[in-house]
Image (cartoon, rainbow, N blue to C red):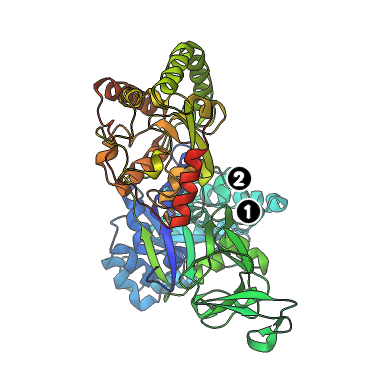
Amino acid sequence: MTDKRSWVEIDLGQLRKNYEIYKALQPEGRGVMAVVKADAYGHGDAEVTAELSRLGADHFAVSNIDEALHVRRVTDGQILILGYTPVDRAKELVDNDITQTLLSEEYAELLLSSGHPVRCQFAIDTGMRRIGLDADFPDECERVIRKYSANLTGLFTHLCVADTPSQDEFTKEQIAKFGAVCEKVADLGLSCHCMNSAAGLWHDADSSFVRLGIVLYGLKPDYENELPDGIAPVLSWKSVISMVKEIKAGDTVGYGRSFEADGPMTVATVPTGYADGYSRLLSNKGYVLVGGRKARIVGRVCMDQMMIDVTGIPDVGIGTETVLIGKSGGETITADDLAHMYGTIGYEIVCGINKRVRRVFLKYNQRYLHTSEANKVYRKVIKRALDILISFLALVILSPVLLITAIAVKIDSKGPALFKQTRLGRGGKEFKILKFRSRVVNAEHTGSGVYSGKDDARVTKVGKFIRKTSIDELPQVINILAGQMSLIGPRPPLTYHPWPIEEYTDEQKRMFEVRPGITGWAQVNGRKDVEWNRRIEMNVWYVDHVSFILDLKIFFMTIFKVATNADNENVSETVKKDAPAQAAEEQTEKEEIK
């Protein structure tokens, strides 16, 4: 049971991934300015800035001087304030090497006559009518820019409908107007940038920087937009169940009695409300995720709590995790989805999560390695093709070995030659893994409750040999051909060991993003000498680094370990869960294939 009431998880690995994917899509020579205003859109500006700085990011944008000073603590890079700074704080701008936006000629005069040599950039208004010199009068823009050129490092504009295809003509007009102004002062050598997150994906312009904002955090500029593959939300919002109750037909729920049950229902209370930033507009409209299923909100969202319908959802009780934004099982709800439910934008959702909601920053070990296009093809196509080809050839070439082994198993010990055992595969789905039987029939009902070691009497004579040589694993080529496994990948765990799928953390569940393998990175790096949490970390690392070279390395390391019988004796204790789970597993052990 968690010690938290309501919390946000910030996946720093996904943040890195989003940044690198987006950056790779930009033309050569265009820099990326990370927009970390509004506490990095609710994600934590200091942590986000520090993480991006480790990737080499050195330009950041904020809204005001207080944000800039907070970010300055963690970066030596350039910081641009996009909004207003009181003139009497000009010295702070200089002392902290912060660049200030000039909103107008009047503001420029006030700020730069203060006696402090503030470094600045001029905003150019190309149609949004918010701040900046009016680009409809390029000659006047040139006059003002040259007047204050000694303090200027750049010019920028904002493309206000770059995320809306039906407004592309307006965006093109904005780009043209900005280009005309920049051309008039080209001799000043100023940095000119007009691209925001959307423009950097769907428009073309001569821009020294792209100001990467909402897409950095894995959200859409507009709900109808489609983001590049691999870019995903960085933020998840979670809470717990604080109470579960049964209500009857006619009972009403919450303030104003806005919901009336039309039959018996199970209602749960979640200790998160509008004071935490979960909008009251989602009353009787939104839903959360519990146990991989949708649970609708019933009644009005309260200041600190809300009620949800958990009828038919099993195993719900005090402390059960509830996902407000993020993934649970096969279901996902994003900030963009929430926003769409009541006519706002994802920006408002994440920026509106109150500070009293605890931020948890998920650490990682080099979680993501940006891969080449060739390697992406390997992951999606070639790896599977090689699995099928090698497994088919192995089945044909080794058929005599398979036949002799099956006969030897049956002669050595009564019972079938093969058995199937329930394991967790891709997506956490259960499947039956195939092996040659190496123990006596019903061995699961006897013994010490640990994996079989070399002195375990339940292991047959033939079983000892096929385990030592790993021949017992050969039937898994059938699992590969069936699409359940791969030659190389995370080794599939039992359904109850080391723990049930529900008890894996979100980070640990990432090992199930690929097909499990006959061998894998954890298998060749200590295997049974490695504690389970570390073993799972290795599996997750593999998921992020899959490549032909890595798979080839694991393949040859496996051959070496099999040849030298390294790490091939099972000695780790099998953690038994509750009796029903253990009994279910024992039953699957009986489902043998003759």
Q: Position of residue 127 (x, y in %)?
A: 63, 60
Q: What residue is shown with label 2? A: 202
Can you say which quadrant of the picture contains the C terminus? top right
Q: Which residue is drawn at 39% across and 36% down?
A: 545
Front residue of this view, candidates 334 and 35: 334
Q: Is residue 272 above or below residue 456?
A: below
Q: What residue is shown with label 1? A: 163
Front residue of this view, candidates 360 and 103: 360
Secondary structure found at label 2: helix
Q: Do the residues labelled 1 and 2 touch (CB within 8 Å)?
A: yes
Looking at the rendered structure, the kind of residue marked 1 is Asp
Looking at the rendered structure, the kind of residue marked 2 is Trp
Q: Is residue 429 left or right of residue 38?
A: right
Q: Is residue 399 left or right of residue 560?
A: right
Front residue of this view, candidates 98 and 423: 423
Q: Where is residue 346 in the image (x, y as percent from the top left)?
A: 57, 63
Real-space Cα separation, disc 1 to disc 2, in angstroms: 8 Å
Q: In this view, does 484 lie above or below 150?
A: above
Is the residue marked by circle 2 packed among few (<14), some (14-19), or many (20+) residues within 10 Å? few
Q: In this view, does 66 lie above or below 360?
A: below
Q: Judge whether residue 36 can be spotted in this image.
A: no
Front residue of this view, candidates 207 and 477: 477
Q: Which residue is drawn at 46% across and 53% down?
A: 581
Secondary structure found at label 1: loop
Q: N-terminal of the two: label 1 or label 2?
A: 1
Question: Mark number for residue 442?
Answer: none
Q: Judge whether residue 296 can be spotted in this image.
A: yes
Q: Which residue lies furthest to the front in this view?
A: 414
Q: Position of residue 538 (x, y in %)?
A: 33, 41
Q: Where is residue 327 in the image (x, y as percent from the top left)?
A: 53, 56
Is the residue marked by circle 1 packed among few (<14), some (14-19), or many (20+) residues within 10 Å? many
